[in-house]
Amino acid sequence: MAIDLQQVSDVSTEPGELPETMAAWVIREERYGEPKDAFQVEEIEVPQPGAFEVIVRVMAAGVNYNNVWAALGKPVSVMRYGDHPEFGHHIGGSDASGVVWKVGAGVTRWKPGDEVVVHCNQASYEDPEVHGLDPMAAPSQKIWGYETTWGSFAQFTKVQAQQLLAKPAALTWEESASYGLVYFTAYRMLITRCNLQAGRNVLIWGAAGGLGVFATQICAAAGAHCVGVVSSPEKGELVKRLGAVDYIDRNDFAGMMRTGTETPEEEKARFGVSREFAKRVKQILGDAPDIVFEHVGQATFPTSVFTVKPFGKVVICAGTTGFNLDFDVRYLWMKQKEILGSHFANAYECMKANELIESGQIRPVLWRTLGFDGVAEAHQLMLENKHLGKISILIGAEREGDGKTAEGPGAIHAEVGA
Protein backbone atom coordinates (compact mmCIF):
# COMPACT_ATOMS: atom_id res chain seq x y z
CA MET A 1 0.00 0.00 0.00
CA ALA A 2 1.40 3.41 -0.98
CA ILE A 3 1.66 5.91 1.86
CA ASP A 4 0.77 9.56 1.18
CA LEU A 5 3.34 11.53 3.17
CA GLN A 6 1.23 14.66 2.82
CA GLN A 7 -1.59 13.05 4.82
CA VAL A 8 0.30 11.93 7.93
CA SER A 9 -1.26 14.78 9.93
CA ASP A 10 -4.65 13.08 9.48
CA VAL A 11 -5.73 10.10 11.58
CA SER A 12 -8.95 8.15 11.26
CA THR A 13 -9.82 7.77 14.94
CA GLU A 14 -10.62 9.94 17.95
CA PRO A 15 -8.62 9.86 21.22
CA GLY A 16 -9.28 6.60 23.01
CA GLU A 17 -9.36 4.50 19.84
CA LEU A 18 -6.37 3.46 17.72
CA PRO A 19 -6.29 2.87 13.98
CA GLU A 20 -4.99 -0.49 12.81
CA THR A 21 -1.92 0.84 10.98
CA MET A 22 0.27 3.93 10.80
CA ALA A 23 2.98 5.49 8.66
CA ALA A 24 6.47 5.18 10.16
CA TRP A 25 10.08 5.69 9.12
CA VAL A 26 11.62 2.26 9.64
CA ILE A 27 15.18 0.95 9.75
CA ARG A 28 15.81 -2.75 9.08
CA GLU A 29 19.07 -4.62 9.51
CA GLU A 30 19.32 -5.66 5.86
CA ARG A 31 19.51 -2.03 4.72
CA TYR A 32 21.95 -0.61 7.27
CA GLY A 33 23.96 2.22 5.77
CA GLU A 34 23.67 5.95 5.25
CA PRO A 35 20.40 7.38 6.61
CA LYS A 36 19.11 8.30 3.14
CA ASP A 37 19.08 4.57 2.36
CA ALA A 38 18.47 3.00 5.76
CA PHE A 39 15.33 4.98 6.61
CA GLN A 40 12.25 4.01 4.58
CA VAL A 41 8.57 4.77 5.10
CA GLU A 42 6.46 1.70 5.84
CA GLU A 43 2.92 0.95 6.94
CA ILE A 44 3.26 -0.58 10.41
CA GLU A 45 0.68 -2.05 12.78
CA VAL A 46 -0.10 0.38 15.60
CA PRO A 47 0.98 -1.09 18.95
CA GLN A 48 -1.46 -1.48 21.82
CA PRO A 49 -0.54 -0.13 25.26
CA GLY A 50 0.36 -2.63 27.95
CA ALA A 51 0.10 -2.05 31.69
CA PHE A 52 1.43 1.39 32.67
CA GLU A 53 1.95 2.24 29.00
CA VAL A 54 0.52 5.00 26.83
CA ILE A 55 0.07 5.42 23.09
CA VAL A 56 0.83 9.00 22.01
CA ARG A 57 -0.17 10.53 18.72
CA VAL A 58 3.08 12.22 17.69
CA MET A 59 2.63 15.86 16.68
CA ALA A 60 6.33 16.59 16.23
CA ALA A 61 9.61 14.74 16.76
CA GLY A 62 13.16 15.85 17.49
CA VAL A 63 16.22 14.58 15.64
CA ASN A 64 19.33 13.35 17.51
CA TYR A 65 22.57 11.70 16.42
CA ASN A 66 21.65 8.42 18.08
CA ASN A 67 19.52 7.44 15.09
CA VAL A 68 22.37 8.17 12.71
CA TRP A 69 24.09 5.36 14.61
CA ALA A 70 20.94 3.24 14.36
CA ALA A 71 20.87 3.71 10.58
CA LEU A 72 24.54 2.83 10.19
CA GLY A 73 24.30 -0.17 12.52
CA LYS A 74 27.39 1.23 14.25
CA PRO A 75 29.08 1.13 16.67
CA VAL A 76 26.64 -1.67 17.53
CA SER A 77 23.43 -2.91 15.94
CA VAL A 78 20.29 -1.82 17.79
CA MET A 79 18.55 -4.98 16.60
CA ARG A 80 20.27 -7.21 19.16
CA TYR A 81 18.70 -5.79 22.32
CA GLY A 82 15.67 -4.07 23.80
CA ASP A 83 12.41 -5.11 22.16
CA HIS A 84 13.93 -5.19 18.66
CA PRO A 85 14.30 -9.00 18.45
CA GLU A 86 10.54 -9.28 19.01
CA PHE A 87 9.58 -6.94 16.18
CA GLY A 88 12.54 -7.10 13.78
CA HIS A 89 12.48 -3.42 12.90
CA HIS A 90 13.50 -0.08 14.37
CA ILE A 91 11.41 3.11 14.50
CA GLY A 92 13.76 5.81 15.75
CA GLY A 93 13.20 9.14 17.46
CA SER A 94 14.02 9.93 21.10
CA ASP A 95 12.24 13.32 21.38
CA ALA A 96 8.54 13.96 20.84
CA SER A 97 5.58 16.16 21.60
CA GLY A 98 2.08 14.89 21.10
CA VAL A 99 -1.38 13.97 22.37
CA VAL A 100 -2.23 11.04 24.62
CA TRP A 101 -4.41 8.76 22.46
CA LYS A 102 -4.89 5.61 24.53
CA VAL A 103 -3.76 4.50 28.00
CA GLY A 104 -3.06 1.03 29.33
CA ALA A 105 -4.12 -0.65 32.54
CA GLY A 106 -2.94 1.10 35.69
CA VAL A 107 -2.42 4.54 34.12
CA THR A 108 -4.23 7.15 36.24
CA ARG A 109 -2.26 10.38 35.77
CA TRP A 110 -2.87 10.77 32.03
CA LYS A 111 -5.98 10.55 29.88
CA PRO A 112 -6.74 10.69 26.13
CA GLY A 113 -6.47 14.26 24.87
CA ASP A 114 -3.68 15.38 27.21
CA GLU A 115 -0.90 17.32 25.48
CA VAL A 116 2.52 16.01 26.45
CA VAL A 117 6.27 15.98 25.91
CA VAL A 118 8.06 12.62 26.06
CA HIS A 119 11.38 12.04 27.85
CA CYS A 120 13.45 9.14 26.61
CA ASN A 121 14.36 7.10 29.69
CA GLN A 122 12.68 3.72 30.18
CA ALA A 123 13.11 1.19 32.97
CA SER A 124 11.10 -1.74 34.29
CA TYR A 125 8.62 -0.92 37.04
CA GLU A 126 9.76 -4.14 38.75
CA ASP A 127 13.43 -3.14 39.14
CA PRO A 128 14.06 -2.19 42.80
CA GLU A 129 16.50 0.53 41.67
CA VAL A 130 13.52 2.39 40.20
CA HIS A 131 11.91 2.64 43.63
CA GLY A 132 14.82 3.39 45.93
CA LEU A 133 18.01 4.34 44.09
CA ASP A 134 17.65 5.83 40.61
CA PRO A 135 15.99 4.47 37.46
CA MET A 136 19.24 5.22 35.61
CA ALA A 137 20.85 2.45 37.71
CA ALA A 138 18.23 -0.16 36.81
CA PRO A 139 19.49 -3.12 34.77
CA SER A 140 16.51 -2.66 32.44
CA GLN A 141 17.33 1.01 31.71
CA LYS A 142 17.05 1.90 28.01
CA ILE A 143 16.86 4.99 25.83
CA TRP A 144 13.49 5.02 24.10
CA GLY A 145 13.69 5.45 20.34
CA TYR A 146 17.21 4.04 20.21
CA GLU A 147 17.34 0.96 22.40
CA THR A 148 13.62 0.40 21.84
CA THR A 149 11.77 0.18 18.55
CA TRP A 150 8.75 2.44 19.16
CA GLY A 151 10.33 5.85 18.61
CA SER A 152 8.82 9.14 17.52
CA PHE A 153 9.24 9.03 13.71
CA ALA A 154 5.73 7.65 13.26
CA GLN A 155 2.14 8.76 13.59
CA PHE A 156 1.89 6.96 16.94
CA THR A 157 4.42 5.84 19.52
CA LYS A 158 4.32 3.62 22.60
CA VAL A 159 5.88 4.89 25.84
CA GLN A 160 5.82 4.21 29.56
CA ALA A 161 3.45 6.51 31.42
CA GLN A 162 6.32 7.82 33.54
CA GLN A 163 7.93 9.24 30.38
CA LEU A 164 5.23 11.86 29.96
CA LEU A 165 5.54 15.51 30.92
CA ALA A 166 3.01 18.30 30.47
CA LYS A 167 3.63 20.17 27.22
CA PRO A 168 4.68 23.79 27.89
CA ALA A 169 1.70 25.86 26.73
CA ALA A 170 3.81 28.71 25.33
CA LEU A 171 5.68 26.41 22.95
CA THR A 172 4.63 25.13 19.54
CA TRP A 173 4.63 21.42 18.77
CA GLU A 174 7.99 21.61 17.00
CA GLU A 175 9.56 23.67 19.79
CA SER A 176 8.30 21.21 22.42
CA ALA A 177 9.82 18.30 20.51
CA SER A 178 13.24 19.89 20.18
CA TYR A 179 14.85 19.93 23.60
CA GLY A 180 14.29 16.84 25.77
CA LEU A 181 17.28 14.58 25.18
CA VAL A 182 20.00 17.25 25.26
CA TYR A 183 18.44 19.55 27.86
CA PHE A 184 17.58 16.87 30.39
CA THR A 185 21.08 15.41 29.97
CA ALA A 186 22.66 18.79 30.72
CA TYR A 187 20.35 19.32 33.70
CA ARG A 188 21.37 16.07 35.38
CA MET A 189 25.05 16.74 34.70
CA LEU A 190 25.05 20.14 36.37
CA ILE A 191 22.25 20.08 38.93
CA THR A 192 22.32 16.49 40.18
CA ARG A 193 25.84 15.26 39.53
CA CYS A 194 27.66 18.54 40.28
CA ASN A 195 25.21 20.17 42.70
CA LEU A 196 25.56 23.46 40.85
CA GLN A 197 25.25 26.46 43.16
CA ALA A 198 25.03 30.22 42.69
CA GLY A 199 28.46 31.80 42.36
CA ARG A 200 30.17 28.69 40.99
CA ASN A 201 32.42 29.00 37.95
CA VAL A 202 31.83 26.64 35.01
CA LEU A 203 33.72 25.94 31.78
CA ILE A 204 31.45 24.64 29.01
CA TRP A 205 32.91 22.92 25.96
CA GLY A 206 30.86 23.24 22.78
CA ALA A 207 28.74 25.94 24.39
CA ALA A 208 26.82 26.71 21.18
CA GLY A 209 26.04 23.05 20.52
CA GLY A 210 22.97 21.01 21.43
CA LEU A 211 24.09 20.32 24.99
CA GLY A 212 26.01 23.55 25.47
CA VAL A 213 23.17 25.98 24.83
CA PHE A 214 21.26 24.40 27.70
CA ALA A 215 24.28 24.12 30.01
CA THR A 216 24.84 27.84 29.49
CA GLN A 217 21.23 28.70 30.32
CA ILE A 218 21.21 26.41 33.37
CA CYS A 219 24.27 28.19 34.74
CA ALA A 220 22.63 31.58 34.23
CA ALA A 221 19.37 30.43 35.86
CA ALA A 222 21.29 29.03 38.86
CA GLY A 223 23.33 32.20 39.34
CA ALA A 224 26.57 30.50 38.31
CA HIS A 225 29.21 32.09 36.07
CA CYS A 226 30.19 30.28 32.88
CA VAL A 227 32.55 30.70 29.98
CA GLY A 228 31.76 28.88 26.76
CA VAL A 229 34.18 27.40 24.25
CA VAL A 230 32.89 27.88 20.68
CA SER A 231 34.15 27.68 17.11
CA SER A 232 33.38 31.22 15.91
CA PRO A 233 32.72 34.75 17.23
CA GLU A 234 29.12 34.53 15.95
CA LYS A 235 28.49 31.48 18.12
CA GLY A 236 30.25 33.26 20.96
CA GLU A 237 27.76 36.10 20.78
CA LEU A 238 24.91 33.56 20.99
CA VAL A 239 26.25 32.01 24.20
CA LYS A 240 26.69 35.47 25.69
CA ARG A 241 23.05 36.12 24.83
CA LEU A 242 22.17 32.88 26.63
CA GLY A 243 23.94 34.06 29.79
CA ALA A 244 27.66 33.28 29.52
CA VAL A 245 30.11 35.76 31.03
CA ASP A 246 32.18 35.50 27.85
CA TYR A 247 33.41 33.00 25.31
CA ILE A 248 36.67 31.54 24.02
CA ASP A 249 37.15 30.78 20.33
CA ARG A 250 38.72 27.33 20.32
CA ASN A 251 40.57 28.21 17.10
CA ASP A 252 42.76 30.52 19.19
CA PHE A 253 43.98 27.48 21.13
CA ALA A 254 43.84 24.78 18.43
CA GLY A 255 47.14 23.29 19.60
CA MET A 256 45.59 22.07 22.88
CA MET A 257 43.46 19.43 21.15
CA ARG A 258 44.85 15.95 21.82
CA THR A 259 44.89 13.19 19.22
CA GLY A 260 46.56 10.51 21.33
CA THR A 261 49.37 10.08 18.79
CA GLU A 262 51.60 12.97 19.89
CA THR A 263 55.35 12.51 20.16
CA PRO A 264 56.90 13.68 23.47
CA GLU A 265 57.86 16.96 21.82
CA GLU A 266 54.39 17.46 20.38
CA GLU A 267 52.81 16.63 23.72
CA LYS A 268 54.99 19.21 25.44
CA ALA A 269 53.88 21.82 22.92
CA ARG A 270 50.24 20.78 23.28
CA PHE A 271 50.44 21.06 27.05
CA GLY A 272 51.87 24.54 26.72
CA VAL A 273 48.81 25.64 24.75
CA SER A 274 46.56 24.05 27.39
CA ARG A 275 48.31 26.15 30.03
CA GLU A 276 47.57 29.30 28.08
CA PHE A 277 43.97 28.22 27.66
CA ALA A 278 43.62 27.64 31.42
CA LYS A 279 45.01 31.12 32.06
CA ARG A 280 42.43 32.59 29.70
CA VAL A 281 39.58 30.75 31.47
CA LYS A 282 40.80 32.01 34.84
CA GLN A 283 41.11 35.52 33.48
CA ILE A 284 37.48 35.54 32.33
CA LEU A 285 35.98 33.91 35.44
CA GLY A 286 38.32 35.43 38.01
CA ASP A 287 39.33 31.98 39.18
CA ALA A 288 39.75 28.45 37.83
CA PRO A 289 36.41 26.71 37.14
CA ASP A 290 34.74 24.66 39.85
CA ILE A 291 33.10 22.54 37.15
CA VAL A 292 34.05 21.56 33.60
CA PHE A 293 31.13 20.46 31.41
CA GLU A 294 32.57 17.73 29.14
CA HIS A 295 31.19 15.81 26.19
CA VAL A 296 34.00 16.17 23.65
CA GLY A 297 36.24 13.46 25.09
CA GLN A 298 39.66 12.61 23.72
CA ALA A 299 40.57 15.99 22.23
CA THR A 300 39.73 18.08 25.28
CA PHE A 301 39.78 15.85 28.34
CA PRO A 302 43.46 16.38 29.31
CA THR A 303 42.85 20.12 29.22
CA SER A 304 39.67 19.74 31.28
CA VAL A 305 41.43 17.83 34.05
CA PHE A 306 44.28 20.35 34.08
CA THR A 307 42.04 23.44 34.01
CA VAL A 308 39.46 22.59 36.69
CA LYS A 309 40.41 23.93 40.12
CA PRO A 310 41.60 21.74 43.02
CA PHE A 311 38.68 19.73 44.42
CA GLY A 312 36.76 20.65 41.27
CA LYS A 313 34.65 18.36 39.11
CA VAL A 314 34.83 17.29 35.47
CA VAL A 315 31.42 15.90 34.46
CA ILE A 316 31.20 13.98 31.17
CA CYS A 317 28.30 12.46 29.22
CA ALA A 318 29.88 11.64 25.83
CA GLY A 319 33.09 11.41 23.81
CA THR A 320 32.37 12.92 20.42
CA THR A 321 36.07 13.05 19.43
CA GLY A 322 36.87 9.65 20.91
CA PHE A 323 36.15 7.68 24.07
CA ASN A 324 39.66 6.44 24.84
CA LEU A 325 40.92 9.16 27.17
CA ASP A 326 44.50 9.63 28.30
CA PHE A 327 45.68 12.48 30.52
CA ASP A 328 48.27 13.31 33.15
CA VAL A 329 46.64 11.75 36.20
CA ARG A 330 48.95 13.64 38.58
CA TYR A 331 46.73 16.70 38.09
CA LEU A 332 43.81 14.57 39.23
CA TRP A 333 45.10 12.93 42.38
CA MET A 334 47.50 15.60 43.63
CA LYS A 335 44.82 18.30 43.30
CA GLN A 336 42.06 15.95 44.51
CA LYS A 337 39.80 16.57 41.53
CA GLU A 338 36.79 14.42 40.58
CA ILE A 339 35.61 12.87 37.31
CA LEU A 340 31.88 12.20 37.16
CA GLY A 341 30.05 10.20 34.52
CA SER A 342 26.47 11.15 33.66
CA HIS A 343 23.82 9.65 31.38
CA PHE A 344 20.50 11.28 30.46
CA ALA A 345 18.14 11.85 33.45
CA ASN A 346 15.41 10.26 35.53
CA ALA A 347 11.73 11.23 35.43
CA TYR A 348 11.94 13.55 38.44
CA GLU A 349 14.88 15.44 36.96
CA CYS A 350 13.05 15.71 33.63
CA MET A 351 9.98 17.09 35.40
CA LYS A 352 11.97 19.71 37.33
CA ALA A 353 13.89 20.71 34.22
CA ASN A 354 10.66 20.98 32.24
CA GLU A 355 9.28 23.39 34.84
CA LEU A 356 12.07 25.81 33.90
CA ILE A 357 10.94 25.58 30.27
CA GLU A 358 7.33 26.22 31.31
CA SER A 359 8.35 29.29 33.29
CA GLY A 360 10.44 30.65 30.40
CA GLN A 361 13.69 30.62 32.40
CA ILE A 362 15.15 28.12 29.91
CA ARG A 363 14.34 28.31 26.19
CA PRO A 364 14.76 25.71 23.44
CA VAL A 365 17.16 26.63 20.63
CA LEU A 366 15.84 25.42 17.27
CA TRP A 367 17.46 25.66 13.83
CA ARG A 368 15.07 24.13 11.32
CA THR A 369 11.73 22.33 11.07
CA LEU A 370 11.05 19.79 8.31
CA GLY A 371 7.96 17.87 7.24
CA PHE A 372 7.49 14.15 7.80
CA ASP A 373 9.16 13.48 4.45
CA GLY A 374 12.37 15.01 5.85
CA VAL A 375 13.31 12.34 8.42
CA ALA A 376 15.96 10.60 6.28
CA GLU A 377 17.25 13.95 5.01
CA ALA A 378 17.65 15.32 8.54
CA HIS A 379 19.76 12.34 9.63
CA GLN A 380 21.83 12.52 6.44
CA LEU A 381 22.55 16.19 7.21
CA MET A 382 23.74 15.12 10.65
CA LEU A 383 25.94 12.35 9.26
CA GLU A 384 27.58 14.80 6.86
CA ASN A 385 27.80 17.52 9.54
CA LYS A 386 25.78 19.89 7.37
CA HIS A 387 23.19 20.71 10.01
CA LEU A 388 23.47 23.96 11.96
CA GLY A 389 21.47 23.12 15.05
CA LYS A 390 18.47 21.21 16.32
CA ILE A 391 15.99 19.86 13.76
CA SER A 392 12.33 19.10 14.45
CA ILE A 393 9.99 17.05 12.26
CA LEU A 394 6.28 17.86 11.87
CA ILE A 395 4.12 14.73 11.99
CA GLY A 396 0.64 15.29 13.41
CA ALA A 397 1.05 19.07 13.35
CA GLU A 398 -0.03 20.52 10.03
CA ARG A 399 2.22 23.57 10.05
CA GLU A 400 4.93 25.35 12.02
CA GLY A 401 3.55 27.44 14.85
CA ASP A 402 0.70 25.09 15.75
CA GLY A 403 0.25 23.97 19.36
CA LYS A 404 1.00 27.22 21.17
CA THR A 405 -1.86 27.95 23.59
CA ALA A 406 -0.39 30.62 25.90
CA GLU A 407 1.77 33.70 25.64
CA GLY A 408 5.47 33.21 26.28
CA PRO A 409 8.92 33.66 24.74
CA GLY A 410 9.02 30.40 22.80
CA ALA A 411 12.19 29.00 21.28
CA ILE A 412 15.27 30.87 20.14
CA HIS A 413 15.73 30.27 16.42
CA ALA A 414 19.42 30.24 15.60
CA GLU A 415 22.21 28.52 13.74
CA VAL A 416 24.29 26.78 16.37
CA GLY A 417 27.12 24.31 16.67
CA ALA A 418 29.87 23.41 19.09
Image (spheres, helix red, strand yellow):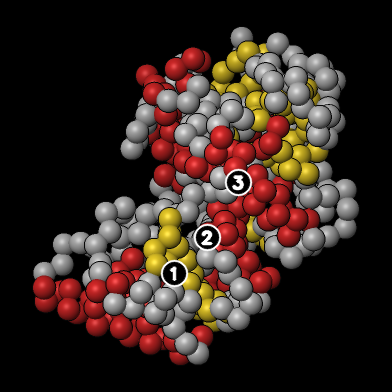
Q: Name the residue under label 3.
A: 346
* Residue nearest the viewer, comparing 73 with 387: 73
Q: Residues within 10 Å of mark 2 (few under 14, many from 20)?
A: some
Q: Please name the residue shown 24% across and 62% down the image.
A: 326
Q: Quadrant of residue 416?
A: bottom right
Q: Where is residue 119 in the image (x, y as percent from the top left)?
A: 64, 42
Q: In which quarter of the image is residue 131?
A: top right
| Left or right side of 319 for 262 | left
Assign a secondary structure to mark 2.
helix
Q: Mark 1 points at which residue?
A: 313
The mark nearer the N terminus, 1 or 3, is: 1
Q: Please name the residue shown 38% across and 87% down the image.
A: 279
Tell me the distance, in whole angstroms, between the alpha carbons under discs 1 and 3.
Answer: 21 Å
Q: Position of residue 296 (x, y in %)?
A: 39, 60
| Left or right side of 240 for 107 | right
| Left or right side of 253 for 292 | right
| Location of residue 194 with respect to 42 vertically, above or below | below
Assign a secondary structure to mark 3.
loop
The mark nearer the N terminus, 3 or 2, is: 2
Q: How crowded is mark 1: few (under 14 residues within 10 Å), some or many (20 or more)?
A: many
Residue flagged by tag 3: what amino acid is it?
Asn
Looking at the image, do the residues carrying marks 2 and 1 touch, with CB atoms under 8 Å apart? yes
Assign a secondary structure to mark 1.
strand
Q: Please name the residue shown 39% across and 67% down the image.
A: 338
The mark nearer the N terminus, 2 or 1, is: 2
| Location of residue 114 with respect to 416 vertically, above or below | above
Tell me the distance, in whole angstroms, between the alpha carbons under discs 2 and 1.
Answer: 9 Å
Q: Name the residue under label 2.
A: 193
* Residue nearest the viewer, comparing 305 with 178: 305
Residue at far right of view: 406
